[in-house]
Amino acid sequence: MGFRRVSEMACVTRLVTQSYATTGVQWVHSGALARLAMLGNAPSRLLIAPQDLRIADPVIAADIYAGRFLFVGQNVETHNASPFEAPAPSEEWSKALHGFSWLRHLRAADTAIAQKNARALVEDWITEVSSGHHIGWSQEVIARRLLSWLSQSPMLLEDCEAEFYRRFMRSIYRQLRFLRGTLYRAPDGLPRLICAIAVVSGYACLEGQEGALARAQEQLDKELLRQILPDGGHASRHPGALLDILLDLLPLKQTLVMRGLSASSAMMEAIDRMMPMVRFFRHGDGSFAHFNGMGSTAGDVVATVLAYDDTRGAAPKGAPYSGYQRLQAGDALVLMDCGAPPPAALSSAAHAGCLSFEMSSRRNRLIVNCGVSARQRLEWRAVARSTAAHSTAGIGDSSSCHFLGPTRFEERIGTPVLSGPKAVNVERRDDEIAERVVASHDGYARDYHLLHERDLTLSRDGTALDGVDRFTWSGSKRGADYYSIRFHLHPQVRCSLVQSGSAVIMQCPDGESWEFSAAGVELALEESIYLSDLFGHRRTHQIVVYGSVNEREEVSWMMRRTAMAKGRRKSSGIA
């Protein structure tokens, strides 16, 4: 058994032990816990329904009525049977089905047929899904289902029969008690925080639950204080976690206000810290940067969240606790990953993208990371997390992080980071001429005794980005010494090699043009892929600089805007 294998088993043992230790309860079969949750009389009525801020599409309601359930890129035809009896093509598909977030599409259809269909599907679940269903009764899925049922309850309960109302209330109360009792069995990080939000939302909506609500709020406050960093980022370093949290936390805040109750100071402060970070990660086209598990997000989702920002504060330049830096000047924006991996228990979505960056100008995305995809998860997951899928430098054929491979404990602990950068040094050097960040990491020191440093300088007029990548030996020279510096292009950017391969012209859809060049090196233009469940996977290109540390320890490169689109505005609109 080799050193790495021993390390992996040690990591599994440690994480599983921590996972059990943090539950605060004994490991009891979910069916037994669910039966315990049935004790007690359910409240007789709902007092309020939280608002669902997620975007709804009434067209999807027609597909559901026809028995077509398309989740995470996988379609199941039920042929007039219950979808809960159909074989699930994947665990992700099953989670989406049992989570009921799709109910919002039926409500958006605003028809009697959609209402009856929604009620029938909820009744199917109550009747057919047993308490021991390993996905339907997992904490994450229960939380999503509770939030969906509560927010869509006006549609489900309007003009319904008394028996359905009673069964619906009993099921909600049963699920709520189960979730509250097993909250700390939920995976640490975002899943557990969403579960805490769901518990508070449930007790806030039910009649006569003031005592339970106060205790649930204390649990939620503890999770918010633990998981939301001082700069407003999430402890997992996943930018999308902010959107997921706010999409559920903002309606909860509104629900408490409508009930005449006060949101806690911990909740209010968490929201106030997160809002500027939503602006921090937003490109000019409204989309989020692709770092550490973030995939494509519709701009209207980000806009919906920001509509609830009362302060409308500007995005910060740096997020030192989250490990990101932001350079903004003129029409240009550069976002850079300058952080070490999060704690192992929160790192299952983390990527090996240290010192990667994304760049946009106005509404044009230029340099990107490849993103992530829930489709064909096993095939794309490892690729998307690798250093090569990011706009940064790699050494040899390896990544700056090593990840735990699939194990029998994957459902419990995921695939966390085993090793990666430990020392990430960041220095900000802004002046009247430019905004500048110099950062370095030691992610390759263990295997190759090499350090990578990246120096980015954005001119004040936003027309030039100068970069330097440096490689220095941290000890005795051994292992691979060749590097590849990659710059992945957004699929809407057309590109071509010019000047005998020493420069690349990048043309944006609106006519804006940029030139990429590197001093004394030859550029390669290779195929790449842009992973997106929202817009579909698309082919694109990447600019690659190859070299050897023994021959060249420093590579200087630059991006210059050569043409501006017609109708240029004075400001980029980035806030």
Image (tube, rainbow, N blue to C red):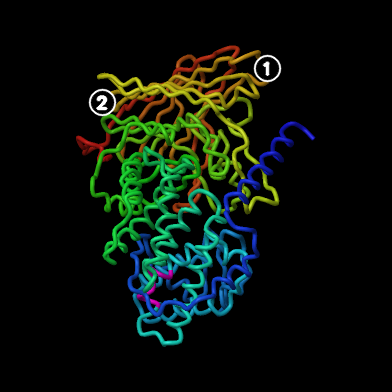
Q: Name the residue under label 2.
A: 461
- Magenta stretch holds residue 521: no
Note whether 393 is above or below 476 in the view shown.
below
Q: In this view, does 362 lie to the left or right of 357?
A: left
Q: Is residue 348 left or right of residue 257?
A: right
| Magenta residues, start to end | 149-156
x, y (%) of residue 558?
40, 22
Q: In this view, does 450 lie to the left or right of 539?
A: right
Q: Give the structural element (helix, strand or loop) at label 2.
A: loop
Q: Name the residue under label 1.
A: 478
Residue 56 falls in image quadrant: bottom left
- Magenta stretch holds residue 150: yes
Q: Give the structural element (helix, strand or loop) at label 1.
A: loop
Image quarter in which the C terminus is found: top left
Q: Which of marks 1 and 2 is nearer the N terminus?
A: 2
Instruction: For label 1, count other residues whose C-alpha is less than 10 Å away and answer few (under 14), some (14-19) or many (20+).
Output: few
Q: Which amino acid does label 1 sit on?
A: Arg
Note whether 199 is above or below 266 in the view shown.
below
Q: Which residue is drawn at 39% across and 64% down?
A: 213
Note whether 172 is above or below 510 in the view shown.
below
Q: What residue type is labelled 2?
A: Asp
Instruction: For label 2, count other residues whose C-alpha is less than 10 Å away and answer few (under 14), some (14-19) or many (20+).
Output: few
Residue 1 numbered mark, or none: none
How far apart are labels 1 and 2 at the CA level?
A: 43 Å
Q: Main secondary structure of the magenta part?
A: helix
x, y (%) of residue 376?
59, 53
Image quarter in which the N terminus is found: top right
Q: Which residue is drawn at 74% across and 36% down?
A: 6
